[in-house]
Image (cartoon, rainbow, N blue to C red):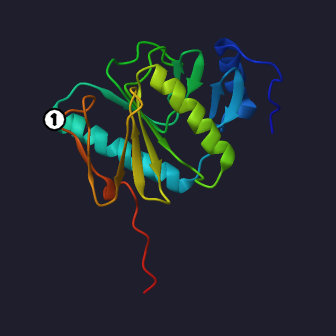
């Protein structure tokens, strides 16, 4: 396992660190100058892909402008580097590497709802996202709900019985929350 640098990193140093061969299979973020491993699991990844697919299909069918990135797309946001599980942005990227423009929407799927450290990192990120005017969907697969965090500090919560609107960012888009969560097979 690669060792983390002990001092606070600049974005350029973080990029160099993240590009090392020993870090190729890791998802890393830079928060307050510190390298943070992004936890993951197959269920969280499946949920993120479902959300990305539903948004992408809607964009294509409605001829709406915008693009969707996955967990390997990084964004520089107020001196931090985040890799949301899904993100929506308007302008097509003009260069490789991290986008210098925050997304309009970030989707963060909680990998381990019981992890104190993941929850603490998420709360730090929500504050930074909010300051950058990014709307964030926090997806909790155990609770089967999505929290929508707005830059003005409002929070709306949608459970699997509800339709979630796309709001000002995705006008006309609606998400059946139940479609995000895979059904568990019955034990027949």
The correct choice, above or below, for 111 with respect to 143 in the image is above
Count of labels in the image: 1
Residue 28 % position (x, y): 64, 32
Is any part of residue 8 visible from this angle? yes
Tell me which corner region of the image, top left, top right, bottom left or bottom right, holds residue 173.
top left
Quadrant housing the N terminus: top right
- In the orientation shown, which residue stands out farthest toward the front? 153
Residue at position x 67%, y 22% from top?
32
In this view of the protein, which residue sits in the foreground, 85 or 104? Answer: 104
Quadrant housing the C terminus: bottom left
In this view of the protein, which residue sits in the foreground, 102 or 114? Answer: 114
- In the orientation shown, which residue stands out farthest toward the bottom? 188
The correct choice, above or below, for 112 with respect to 128 in the image is below
In this view of the protein, which residue sits in the foreground, 116 or 84? Answer: 116
SS of the residue under disc 1: helix
Q: Relative to residue 123, is residue 107 drawn left or right?
A: left
Residue 81 % position (x, y): 58, 23
Residue at position x 17%, y 37% from top?
172
Q: Relative to residue 85, is residue 26 drawn left or right?
A: right
The correct choice, above or below, for 75 with respect to 23 in the image is above
Residue 177 % position (x, y): 32, 54
Q: Residues within 10 Å of mark 1 (few under 14, many from 20)?
A: few
**Residue on which disc 1 sits:** 62
Is any part of residue 74 visible from this angle? no
The correct choice, above or below, for 32 with respect to 167 in the image is above
Tell me which corner region of the image, top left, top right, bottom left or bottom right, holds residue 168.
top left
Residue at position x 51%, y 56% from top?
43
Residue 151 % position (x, y): 40, 26
Residue at position x 46%, y 13% from top?
95
């Amino acid at each position: 396992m690669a060792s983390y640098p002990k001092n606070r990193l600049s974005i350029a140093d973080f990029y160099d660190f993240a590009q090392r061969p020993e870090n190729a299979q890791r998802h890393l973020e830079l928060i307050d100058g510190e390298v943070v491993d992004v936890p993951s699991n197959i269920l969280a990844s499946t949920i993120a892909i479902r959300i990305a697919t539903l948004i992408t299909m809607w964009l294509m069918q409605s001829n709406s402008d915008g693009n969707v990135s996955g967990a390997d797309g990084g964004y520089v946001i107020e001196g931090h580097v985040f890799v949301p599980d899904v993100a929506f942005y308007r302008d097509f990227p003009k260069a490789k590497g991290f986008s210098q423009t925050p997304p309009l929407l970030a989707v963060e799927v909680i990998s381990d709802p019981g992890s104190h450290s993941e929850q603490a990192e998420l709360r730090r990120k929500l504050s930074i996202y909010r300051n950058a005017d990014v709307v964030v969907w926090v997806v909790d697969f155990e609770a089967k709900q999505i929290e929508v965090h707005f830059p003005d500090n409002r929070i709306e919560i949608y459970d699997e019985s509800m339709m979630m609107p796309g709001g000002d960012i995705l006008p006309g888009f609606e998400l059946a929350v139940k479609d995000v969560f895979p059904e568990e097979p019955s034990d027949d």
